[in-house]
Amino acid sequence: MEHILEFLSKGGFVMYPLMLCSVVGMAVVIEKILSLRRKNVIVPEIVSILDNIKGAEDVGLALSICEKHTGPFANIIRVGLESRNLPKEEIKEVLTDFGRQEVHHLERGLVILETVAGIAPLLGLLGTVTGILKVFEVISTLGMGQASAMAGGISEALITTIVGLSIGIPAVVGYNFFTNKAETLVLEIEKYSALLLSKVSGFKTNRTSDAGRKEAEGLE
């Protein structure tokens, strides 16, 4: 550990923002690992009750289960069930508008990770430039023969480059991975939203058919 700290301390002042990028990036990665787990987003209990909804009499149970859970999926299904008495196009519009707001939570933090991926190598490049500048200052002051004096600037240039790339490369990989995972979950939420829309629309069709049948029976 002491050797690592000694190594990093040679990177100069640029190491401070680089370490901050490292901590922030790691925090976002850990948060996305936990928040984007499929069972935490696509709640199995809600999927099960949604698949088993047969009529309007099942809505109460479905709503109570949705209210027990938090997250975009539970909230979208709950809003869809609460809007079941609206015309189909209005329900679709409600699901679309509300869903757009909710799925934004799945992508929360990814902009930060993308920023870390972008600026960490640039900070490393900045450290490279400042390190080389120190080397030239030594050359202009003491001449080319002072290799030990130039070593500090060279070390700073190399260390900041290494650290910047070591932070930036995993951040890029993490950003692409979590972006793809979030998009996959959004598509799955849309699939269940479409299923919900077809079911609640069927409720109104059944009620209309029942009303027509009762009216016909009354005429007889």
Image (tube, rainbow, N blue to C red):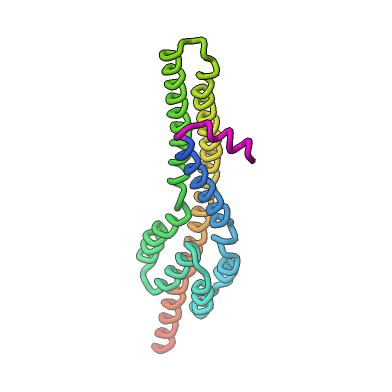
Is 97 left, or right, of 176 in this rendering? left
Tell me which residue sits at (63%, 39%) in the image.
2
User: Relative to residue 5, is residue 65 depicted above or below?
Assistant: below
- In depth, the one of 190 and 119 nearer the eye is 119
Q: Which residues are magenta?
A: 1-14
Q: Tell me which residue sits at (57%, 66%) in the image.
A: 47
Image position, residue 182 (x, y; %) = 51, 51
Residue 179 seen from this side: no
The answer to whether residue 130 is seen in the rendering is: yes
In this view, the residue farthest toward the front is 142
Image-quadrant location for residue 205: bottom left
Instruction: Give whichever of 99, 178 is nearer the camera.
Output: 178
Place of residue 137 in the rendered image (x, y in percent of width and height, measured from the top left): 42, 18
Quadrant that contains the N terminus: top right
Determine the residue positioned at 44% across, 87% down.
217
Quadrant position of the C terminus in the picture = bottom left
Please tell me which residue lies in front, 22 or 1.
1
Residue 8 sits inside the magenta stretch: yes
Against 211, residue 107 (above or below) is: above
Q: Position of residue 63 (x, y in %)?
A: 49, 75
